[in-house]
Every structure is written in C-alpha cells, then in structure tokens.
Image (cartoon, grey):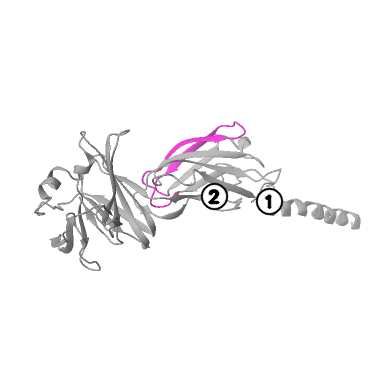
Amino acid sequence: MFVATALLLVGALVAAPSISGAKNAVKQFTAVITPNTAAGGVSGTWTERVKNCGTPLEAPCTASSTIAIGRVRITAPSEFRATIAPVSVSASDGSTWTLSYDSGTGALTAQPDNGSNKLNSGEFVDITFSATPNTCRAGSIPFTTTAIGGLPSGPDNQTFSIVGSPPSVTSLGCTFTDPSGQTETISGDFEGQVDVTFGGDLSCLFDPTFGNQWSQFNLPSQVNITPGAGFVAHGPKISTSRFQTEGFDSSLYLICYAVPTAGHTAFATRGGGTAVVQNIGGTDFFVGILPNCYDPITGLTRPEPCVSEQFLDLATNEIVISVRMQPGDPLKH
C-alpha cells in the first residue's frame, strides 16, 4: 500500500507541470495596418497583418509563442462600422482562411477552415478590408485586434497579448461625398471629431458686386461643417471641395461662406467688403463671398476665412477649391 501511494504521488507530480504549462503558455502577437497613413483622408482599403511571434525573435516580440492562433478579430471604431467590407484574407502558410463581418458588433473575424491550419509560431495572416468613415476624426484611430488560440468555433479562453503599438490609421483629413458626386475633405491641426453634411439654402445673391457671378458659379451643394465630440483646434481647418465641371475657368467659381456671429467677428469679403449678418434657421451668421488668401496688392496673406487654393484638375476634370477656416461650425456654398 505504501508503494502504491508513493507511485500515485509521483504520478500527480509528473502530471502537474503539463497543466501548469498550458496555463503559462507564451501567447504573443503583433498587428500592423498598411498603409498606416492614407493620403487625403482615412477612407480607403487597408491590409492588417497579424503575426504570431516566432523564431527568430523580432522586436517588439519578447518571446516566441508556444501555441497557435485559431482566430483573429478586428473591431472597427464607430466611425467606420456602417461601411466596413471584408475584401480578402491570406495566410503565410498558404492555408485557406475565411473572413466575415458582423455589422452589429463592428467585428471582422478571420479564421482557418479547419483547426489544423491555425497560425503557428512565426506565421502571419493578411486581412484586407475597406471602409469609409461617417465622421471625421483627426489623430490616430485604433482598430482593436484580438488573437485567440482556441479552435475557430471555440470560446475565447486562450487570448494572446498584443506587443508593440496597436494597429491604427492616421487621419490626414476625412473625405465625405454628396450624392451629386461633390466631395469634401476636412484636414488641419485639430483633435476630435468633425461632422459634414450637405444641403441648405445659404445664398450670397445679395452681394452687389459678385452676387450674379456667384449664382452661376458656386459649389453644387452647400457644405455644413460641425465640430463634434472632443473637438479641439490647434490651428485653422482646411476644407477642400472637388466637383465635376463642364470646362469652365476655375476662377469663375465663388464661395459663399457663413459662420455664426456668436464667438466670431465679421470677416473680410471679396472686393474689400465685410460679411453681413443673416439669420439662417434661427441662428445669426456672418455671411459673405470669400476672398483669396493671397493679396496680390499687399503681397500678404489674408486672415481666415479665405480661399487658399483654386484650380482645375485636368486629370479628373474637377474644380478643386480649398478654404482655410477658423475653428467653428461654418457653412459654405
């Protein structure tokens, strides 16, 4: 009996390390979105590479993983969820993976067709998706990524730790598109969120000098720009409009601009005038036709708001007009 008991104790001691080892398995992965910065805005198509840390060890990994990855989940930020679309998924070992999207949770899920095709140590999977934000937010925008070691249909009980910086895209400005095809890109030195909508009845027909010209040559759609959650301006915002033309000289187009009187002063208008007060939807605005930022008479740059760039893009046959704006919630038409 003593010998039998001793053998049982030895068996228990031998079994314990394997159980402890499963709990303490090394589970590390890296995730990087390419391109990290999308020129002209954060709208576009990206590929996120998720790699199981392996040998040879590459920073920021601190150790090679001892188990495989059976599922990858990328949760999109709220600004993108309505337009996320899975494009493709490709594993480095050539195995077949599937990619799906749940619009309710905002999660893209990539997983192998069977458990034997999981990502082993040192292997990676490329997950490609497209998205267009419904709001504009400057700065780094993270896509929360989770790697799970369990089988594709199993519970999240073997979660890996991400090492290095979390995958994110960097906003240079967000682009919004009106049904007419006019696009609006918001950029500049600011933090937080900016919302853009199209439509309205802003008019500068009252201008005695340029009213008739404006009525013939203006943006197809009024643009309404509203600072959103967490908005903090460190400098002027820039709003760039692009729209199709029928061969007209780009300089013929004029911008009717409005900014709330509250917190603002009347701005200089085209021809040397000053913006006038008009009530739009129950709110008083300073309204007028914007001058160019560069004053050829003085050789100086006018203060915001003003037109900083205006030309015809011969490659796309589009009029391009950029406006430097003060912080606030302007309208332009």
Label 2 CA crowd tier, 10 Å (few <14, some 14–19, many 20+): some
Q: Are marks 2 and 1 in contact (CB under 8 Å)?
A: no
Circle 1: element type:
loop
Which image quadrant for residue 39?
Answer: top left
Residue 288 locus on image (x, y percent): 17, 57
Residue 127 locus on image (x, y percent): 51, 39
Left or right: where does residue 253 sit relative to residue 313?
Answer: left
Residue kind at label 2, given as amino acid type: Thr
Residues rendered magenta in the picture: 76-105
Which residue is denoted by mark 1 in the rendering? 26
Left or right: where does residue 176 sit relative to residue 122?
Answer: left
In magenta segment, residue 93: yes
Residue 207 locus on image (x, y percent): 11, 54
Circle 2: element type:
strand
Which image quadrant for residue 265?
Answer: bottom left
In magenta segment, residue 250: no
Name the foreground residue: 76 vs 66.
76
Let me know if residue 155 appears in the view: no
Which residue is denoted by mark 2 in the rendering? 146
Tell me which numbered mark, 2 or 1, is placed earlier along the sequence: 1
The structure residue drawn at horizontal position 20% and vertical position 44%, both measured from the top left corner, is 253
- The label on residue 254 is none
Residue 125 locus on image (x, y percent): 57, 39
Left or right: where does residue 261 sit relative to residue 85?
Answer: left
Label 2 to label 1: alpha-carbon separation: 15 Å
Left or right: where does residue 295 sit relative to residue 107?
Answer: left
The structure residue drawn at horizontal position 36% and vertical position 46%, both measured from the top left corner, is 82
Let me know if residue 178 appears in the view: yes
Residue kind at label 1, given as amino acid type: Val
